[in-house]
Image (cartoon, helix red, strand yellow):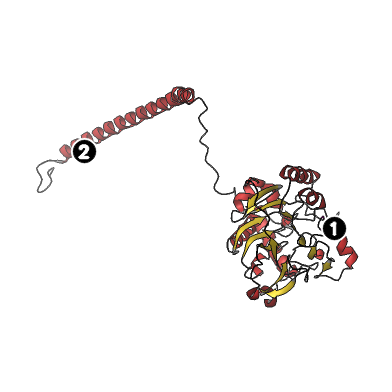
């Protein structure tokens, strides 16, 4: 009864062998664990030797400190996901934005305002179909510019090709009321749109609505807006032009919650940076900035912020506001700039805000042919 049919051993013998195998396995595992622990101890000891002995010796041999191997950030730090209440707030804000900021017409998407700064017969430019833009004037650089898109960048249509694209700030709209995560996604979408703008070089600054950019700081903002050169009280030599950018603007109303880059400290930083830069071919600012313009003496000053002041000023030309019905004297006051009144007709000061006073996308993007300045002795930048 105690034997297994067809087998040569009884149950007790099988149980004994199984127990012996289990003991052997346990012993082997314990030995392996001890070996792993010993190896870890050896690695730790080797690390201490490298850090305490080898690196100091390398420093002595090289005569200088060994650089710290800290990884370079390849992407901006994303904000924490919003709470459920924050998500509801963002959805409600999207609905409010859709109801308040209207989209442009098909006609708008097919036209631009074109300014040939070498042509004195049309100082304020002419409206032309994007498909019928004149060939770039000889010896000129073509600038395509807009600002104050307020999250409607994707509705502007296919932008014209050019040498330099400029966005003068206010990418977002009332951003302080959105969650940081929502603002981050809106800026990512804007950066993707930038990647499709058919211009060789691209420069972007922030505006007073761009709360998250102010919170991120210059370096993180540059990573987020990586499809362009982001300027914040700095400059870059690109495409043969020195471009200075500042996000500074003046608070339009004491009740406005959109206060990014409107502090005295930021305005002072812009003045200091402009003095350090010395001169620039193109000044990009969010609001009109006569003090910085006086320092830099640019050939073109591209700005936004005051939607009502959309239009172009040429040196020696009459100020014309083509987007609103405000009295011309008031518009001239808003457009006061170092270029206004100059005898140099090739100098251009332009407010390129694409939204009008009622937050409708009605003001056309500008295409400006600007005489290419003489080359500078050396390229430089301070981003």
* Residue 3 percent across, percent down from the top left: 12, 44
* Residue 79 seen in the figure: no
- Can residue 274 be seen by looking at this rendering? yes
Q: Residue 257 location in percent, x, y?
A: 79, 54
Q: Is 249 positioned to the left or the right of 213 in the image?
A: right
The mark lying in front, picked from 1 and 2, is 1
Marker count (numbered): 2
| SS majority, magenta | loop
- On screen, residue 314 versus residue 18, left or right, reads right
Residue 223 position (above or below residue 350): above
* Residue at the image point whose x is 72% and y is 58% from the top: 170
Q: Earlier in the sequence, mark 1 or mark 2?
A: 2
Between residues 294 and 60, which one lies in front from this camera angle? 294
Q: In 3D space, how far apart are the residues under numbered discs 1 and 2 (Cα atoms)?
A: 97 Å
Residue closer to the observer: 42 or 340: 340
Task: Decide if residue 277 is on the left or right side of residue 222.
Answer: right
- Element under disc 1: loop
Looking at the rendered image, the quarter that the N terminus falls into is top left
Which residue position holds label 2? 18
Q: Which residue is mark 1?
A: 336
The x, y position of residue 246, in whole percent, is 73, 50
Q: Quadrant of residue 253?
A: bottom right
Q: Hey, which quadrant is residue 183 in on the image? A: bottom right
Image position of 239 with respect to 35: above or below: below
Is residue 260 within the magenta segment?
Answer: no
**Residue 336 lies in the magenta stretch:** yes
Q: For numbered disc 2, what is the local secondary structure?
A: helix
Name the residue: 67% across, 77% down: 106
User: Given the current orientation, which residue lies at the most extreme bottom position?
Assistant: 107
């Amino acid at each position: 009864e105690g034997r297994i049919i067809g087998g040569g051993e009884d149950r007790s013998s099988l149980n004994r062998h199984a127990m012996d195998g289990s003991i052997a396995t346990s012993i082997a595992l314990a030995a392996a664990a001890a070996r792993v622990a010993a190896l870890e101890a050896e690695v730790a000891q080797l690390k201490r030797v490298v850090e305490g002995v080898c690196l100091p010796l390398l420093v002595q041999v090289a005569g200088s400190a060994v650089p710290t191997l800290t990884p370079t950030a390849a992407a901006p730090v994303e904000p924490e996901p919003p709470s459920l209440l924050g998500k509801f707030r963002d959805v409600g804000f999207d609905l409010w934005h859709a109801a308040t900021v209207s989209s442009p017409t098909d006609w708008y998407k097919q036209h631009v305002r074109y300014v040939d700064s070498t042509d004195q017969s049309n100082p304020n430019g002419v409206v032309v179909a994007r498909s019928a833009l004149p060939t770039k004037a000889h010896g000129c650089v073509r600038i395509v510019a807009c600002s104050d898109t307020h999250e409607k960048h994707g509705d502007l249509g296919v932008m014209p090709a050019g040498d330099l694209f400029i966005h003068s700030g206010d990418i977002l709209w009332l951003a302080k009321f959105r969650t940081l995560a929502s603002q981050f996604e809106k800026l990512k979408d804007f950066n993707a749109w930038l990647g499709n703008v058919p211009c060789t070089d691209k420069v972007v600054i922030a505006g007073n609505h761009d709360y998250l950019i102010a919170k991120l700081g210059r370096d993180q903002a540059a990573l987020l807006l990586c499809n362009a050169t982001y300027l914040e009280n700095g400059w870059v030599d690109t495409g043969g032009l020195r471009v200075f950018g500042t996000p500074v603007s003046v608070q339009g109303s004491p009740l406005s919650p959109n206060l990014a880059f409107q502090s005295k400290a930021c305005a002072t930083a812009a003045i200091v940076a402009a003095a350090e830069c010395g001169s620039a071919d193109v000044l990009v600012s969010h609001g009109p900035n006569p003090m910085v313009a006086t320092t830099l003496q640019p050939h073109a000053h591209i700005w936004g912020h005051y939607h009502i002041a959309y239009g172009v000023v040429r040196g020696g030309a009459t100020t014309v506001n083509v987007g609103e019905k405000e009295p011309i004297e008031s518009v001239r006051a808003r457009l006061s700039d170092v270029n206004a009144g100059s005898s140099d007709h090739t100098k251009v000061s332009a407010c390129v805000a694409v939204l009008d006073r009622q937050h409708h996308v009605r003001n056309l993007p500008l295409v400006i042919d600007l005489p290419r300045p003489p080359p500078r002795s050396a390229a430089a930048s301070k981003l």
